[in-house]
């Protein structure tokens, strides 16, 4: 059991997303860094898709109301448990009354969102098959809204007997992706790609794009050279998914993120591949990103690589925790 | 018969010529003690619990987990052992300090390999 | 408006979904064929969900297939065989206050179409609009049958927040917001209605095949 001590932190309960409800206009939501959530859960022995808390604004504080095992992944944010410094991407044991304090992520490679996983997962009701927060429409997660000071959330169980005190090499280091020293993500061209001027297409792949302050879980607005269509386009509304890069009339691209509308009508330049959404989800406001053109086969392989990394994590954690439990 | 002060001095003079730090003499009448049991700090070698890659610092940090000579509390991670994606802590068994690191940063080590010479207080 | 393509178009939405765009005129019959295609594709084992849009269909994958050729061929064949799936739904009447604070972009529609506010209200409230698809946000209905004279392009810069109940025009389409959120459409009026309840089964109040009529409550 935890009590939130911070206000206005935009923290939300998220799992790996809500699927099967696109037909009713319900998008997937889910953790902006799905890999960090999955890894945190695996370290605790939770189901990989158990609900956790995504924390995008710092500093952030909460108090444990009961004994609990937890994992902190995503951004390295100088975390402390009752003033004891905690290692990042690590599992810990908390005692009732202890306060977890997250500081501001620092440094050139800083990430922007921390994921807090609790033993047994965050215990909120499932709505339409998921515990993710659906902000537009206000349902799912914790009362369909961001967490506030005073909110009390329950864990599935207290994690008693579960080994803690170990961690993981973060995926940003294990599976790095950069172009010219700048964080990069892979993109598959979308339907209207060839309807853009060749000079715009070249600029898209070759320049760095800045993530503006008007960026959040709905979408990232990028600043850079305006992308020009060969002729003006008015499209009929169609389904879209997180990662779709839309180009409105202004020419400044918007990457649809986890809380994106499940449909839209702006021209689509490309889609950031599913396997790289976590990288974008961790890119801080004000930072720059590069886009790498990729093929279907490469994108599927990238997804397999992420899956394999998680499978390896699960195996190694099980080996370690099994060994610990048997007293070896 | 109790030892006289002169005999006590003889024993002390003899001990000074050895490298014995602490000496207890038990007789039916008394126990004589020379030196202090904790005069010299004890050192213990922290060893690898499995095959892995030894790390002085967390991969995300530049600074070492426990700088040489800096006091650390019991239970603090003073090094890491990386096994695939997993990071396991090398833990200070008691309060003390890292006297020397016995394996290089990034070195592959075997089970039982000496990693850190740890000085207890 | 772009000229509609002669053959169906397939495109990728990353590795998450395939987008199928049907050729030809955009009318109820074409949309009914999309419904038929969705019903068939939804049963395919590699498809998680078949989501109709406006004369198009998005298919989300359970797992992205190693190659796409077989799926595209199957989809093409299914489209050619698809017959309009007629659905007789209910008619829902929504009272609308046109213009005023609830219709902040009425002037932009006037400027683009060259029509008066009264004429816009008349043309907008006349038809019976079939619900073509749901999307955008929970419970939101994409409607067919808007008078082409009302068509107004989506806004240069999307508005950060438009309230639930906003009645808007985007390109050749019209719709009603089911909850507050960003929108690139031109809002000409407002209504009150509960479009979505996550506890209900189905959670959306309206579905493809239902019809909406806008009743003029007031023109400000």
Image (cartoon, grey):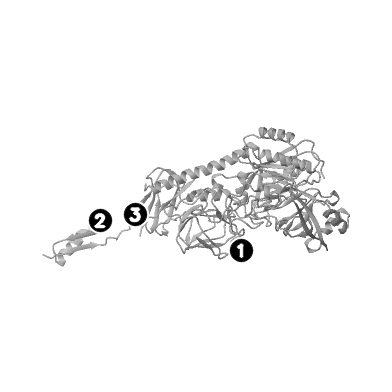
Q: Secondary structure at mark 1?
A: loop
B21 to A187, vertically: above or below: below
The 10 Å Cα crowd at callout 1, few under 14, some 14 to 19, many 20 or more, is few
Q: Which residue is mark 1?
A: A8
Circle 3 residue: B43
Real-space Cα distance between discs 1 and 2?
A: 66 Å
- Which tag is nearer the camera, tag 2 or tag 3? 3
x then y, percent, for residue A26? 66, 51
Please name which of the two marks, 1 or 2, marks the residue nearer to the observer.
Answer: 1
Q: Horizontally, is B71 left or right of A171 in the view?
A: left
Q: Can you say which quadrant of the picture contains the C terminus of chain B?
A: bottom left
Residue C178 tag number: none
**Which numbered dot is residue B19?**
2
Chain at tag 3: B
Query: At 41% across and 60% down in the image, what residue appears?
Result: B71
Spatial CA span between label 2 and label 3: 17 Å
- Estimate the x, y position of residue C25 in percent, counting from the top left: 81, 41
Chain letter of disc 2? B
């Amino acid at each position: 059991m935890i009590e939130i001590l911070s206000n206005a932190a935009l923290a939300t309960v998220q799992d790996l997303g809500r699927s099967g409800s696109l037909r009713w206009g319900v998008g997937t939501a889910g953790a902006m860094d799905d890999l960090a959530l999955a890894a945190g859960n695996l370290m605790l022995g939770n189901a990989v898709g158990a609900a956790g808390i995504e924390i995008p604004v710092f500093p952030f504080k909460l108090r444990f109301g009961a004994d609990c095992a937890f994992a902190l992944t995503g951004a390295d944010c100088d975390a402390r448990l009752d003033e004891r410094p905690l290692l990042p991407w690590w599992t810990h044991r908390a005692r009732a009354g202890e306060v977890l304090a997250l500081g501001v992520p620092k440094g050139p490679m800083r990430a922007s969102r921390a994921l807090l996983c609790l033993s047994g997962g965050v215990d909120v009701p499932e709505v339409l098959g998921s515990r993710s927060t659906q902000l537009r429409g206000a349902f799912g997660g914790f009362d369909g809204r961001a967490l506030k000071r005073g909110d009390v959330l329950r864990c599935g169980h207290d994690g008693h007997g579960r080994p803690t005190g170990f961690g993981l090499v973060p995926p940003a280091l294990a599976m790095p992706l950069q172009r010219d020293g700048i964080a990069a993500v892979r993109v598959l061209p979308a339907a209207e790609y060839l309807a853009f001027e060749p000079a715009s297409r070249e600029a898209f792949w070759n320049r760095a794009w800045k993530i503006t302050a008007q960026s959040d879980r709905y979408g990232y607005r990028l600043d850079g050279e305006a992308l020009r269509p060969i002729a003006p386009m008015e499209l009929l509304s169609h389904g879209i998914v997180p990662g779709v890069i839309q180009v409105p009339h202004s020419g400044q691209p918007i990457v649809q993120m986890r809380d994106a509308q499940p449909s839209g009508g702006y021209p689509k330049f490309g889609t950031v591949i599913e396997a790289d959404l976590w990288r974008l989800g961790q890119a801080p406001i004000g930072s720059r990103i590069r886009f790498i053109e990729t093929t279907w086969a490469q994108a599927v392989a990238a997804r397999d690589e992420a899956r394999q990394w998680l499978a390896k994590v699960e195996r190694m954690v099980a080996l370690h925790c099994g060994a610990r439990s048997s007293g070896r | 018969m109790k030892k006289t002060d002169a005999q006590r001095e003889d024993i002390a003079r003899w001990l000074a010529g050895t490298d014995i730090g602490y000496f207890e003499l038990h007789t039916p009448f008394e126990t004589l003690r020379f030196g202090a049991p904790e005069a010299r700090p004890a050192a213990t070698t922290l060893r690898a619990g499995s095959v892995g890659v030894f790390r002085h610092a967390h991969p995300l940090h530049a600074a070492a987990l426990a700088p040489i000579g800096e006091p650390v509390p019991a239970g603090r991670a003073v090094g890491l052992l990386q096994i695939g994606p997993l990071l396991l802590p090398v833990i200070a068994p008691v309060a003390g300090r890292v006297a020397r690191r016995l394996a290089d940063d990034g070195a592959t080590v075997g089970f039982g390999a000496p990693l850190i010479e740890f000085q207890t207080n | 408006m772009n000229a509609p393509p002669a053959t169906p178009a397939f495109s990728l939405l990353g590795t998450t979904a395939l987008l199928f765009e049907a050729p030809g005129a955009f009318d109820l019959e074409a949309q009914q064929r999309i419904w038929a295609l969705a019903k068939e594709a939804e049963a395919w084992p590699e498809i998680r969900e078949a989501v109709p849009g406006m004369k198009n269909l998005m298919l989300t994958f359970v797992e992205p297939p190693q190659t796409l050729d077989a799926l595209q061929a199957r989809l093409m064949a299914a489209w050619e065989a698809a017959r309009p799936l007629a659905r007789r739904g209910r008619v829902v009447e929504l009272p609308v206050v046109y213009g005023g604070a609830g219709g902040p972009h009425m002037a932009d529609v006037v400027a683009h179409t060259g029509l008066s506010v009264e004429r816009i209200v008349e043309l907008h409230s006349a038809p019976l609009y079939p619900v073509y698809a749901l999307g955008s946000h929970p419970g939101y209905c994409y409607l067919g049958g808007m008078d082409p004279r009302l068509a107004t392009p989506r806004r240069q810069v999307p508005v950060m927040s438009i309230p639930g109940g906003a009645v808007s025009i985007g390109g050749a389409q019209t719709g009603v917001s089911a909850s507050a959120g960003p929108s690139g459409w031109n809002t000409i009026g407002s209504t009150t209605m509960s479009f979505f309840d996550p506890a209900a089964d189905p959670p959306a109040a309206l579905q493809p095949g239902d019809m909406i009529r806008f009743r003029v409550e007031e023109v400000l």
